[in-house]
Image (cartoon, rainbow, N blue to C red):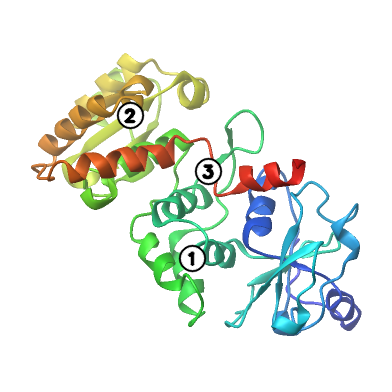
Amino acid sequence: MQREGFSDEKVYHAITMMVLSHISALEYWLSVRIGSRSFVKVPQAPALISKPPSAEPTEGLGPWWLARPLHVLVARDSLRRRGALVCHVWKGALPKGSVLDTQNGFCVCSPEVCFLQMASILSLVELIQLGFELCGTYDLSSDDVRECPSLTSVSKLTACIEKIPNVNGRKKALRALRYIAENSASPMETSLVMLQCLPYRFGGYGMEMPLLNFRIDVTGQARRFTSRSYFKADLYWPAFKLIAEYDSDKYHKEARRKASDSERRNALEAMGYTVVSITLDLVDNRASMARVANVLAKHTGRRLTYVEPEFTVACIKLRSVLFSGERYGLNAERAHQRQ
């Protein structure tokens, strides 16, 4: 059970702790998504970062699995430490819940504050991609993609950022939130939505943002085609009853459906839905994705009007971010640690 406050003894102990921030906070959150964790909201976060961060956990204690040097939060320049820690001076507000005690000897900035901090480090497209992951239901901490609860939501991110004025990256973070959808179930699903829905200037096709993994109950005559009581639509545009399905054995089919593809399609079409299938091969190919965009645009009554060659340049740049294999600087931190 999560506790809402500290005893006096707990507060005194917490004041000696470090507060993970920026890339270390991000690495922490992306590594603890599977499994149960108990956190305690720090009621005196400004006081916590007004003390020199403890050096003890930097070598063998604390978050031993995170890349070194650790990134931590301090309230002013005079509290910076050299060598073992990268200290970030934080002069903005710290609303309730912004810092959490992990109950393992260190504290960490909340996922919402971490997103805001990463806005000063990542490009806008990278920040949008990160937002999809934080608000998504997939874990990438192992070699496989596993299902997990989302860390946050667009509304929680927005509410937190609006309470913290006058910090670097705030404007970019709020801008990124306009292009983030919740409930993405895989990194390829995230890439597909970004490729189809980001504005032309970012290399996307400007489609309206769909609902992701939306539940559709089986009703009426559709029950003749399937024993399932409902389906989940990967990408769903309710105004047009349009569904785009990402078909990938690696990410979806085994865990997602017992009904065959034909049963699913027949049932959905019997209920008046249009289903467009998108495979990994189509996502991997820029020309194929352009054809997919035209099909989706046709079903939504849109006409693609991007200008060449500017759009192609932007699209290539977007794809290089989405499929580079780099994850928000985490790989670079690991490489630095190995040197």
Q: Earlier in the sequence, mark 3 or mark 2?
A: 3
Q: CA distance from mark 2 to mark 1?
A: 28 Å
Q: Is residue 165 above or below residue 296?
A: below
Asked if residue 334 is positioned above or below residue 100 in the image, the reply reads above
Disc 2 versus disc 1: nearer the observer:
1
> Quarter of the image containing the C terminus?
top right
Local secondary structure at mark 3: loop
1 vs 3, front mark = 1
Q: Which mark is residue 157?
A: 1
From the viewer's perspective, is 67 left or right of 145? right
Q: Which residue is mark 2?
A: 245
The residue located at (39%, 52%) in the rendering is 125
Residue 274, visible in the rendered structure:
no
Residue 214 vertical position relative to residue 267 in the rendered view, above or below: below
Q: Quadrant of residue 35?
A: top right
Question: Residue 221, position in %: x, y?
Answer: 23, 25
Is the C-beta separation of discs 2 and 1 under 8 Å? Answer: no
Q: Which amino acid lies under the numbered mark 3 shown in the image of this protein?
A: Thr
Q: Position of residue 218 (x, y in %)?
A: 32, 31
Left or right of 160 in this view: 209: left
Residue ID at (84%, 74%)? 14
Q: Which mark is residue 137?
A: 3
Q: Camera-side residue: 273 or 252?
A: 252
Would residue 228 be seen by someone viewing this image from the given angle? Answer: yes
Q: Residue at x 43, y 56 (%)?
A: 123
Q: Mark 3 and mark 2: span between their CA atoms?
A: 17 Å
Q: Amino acid at mark 1?
A: Leu
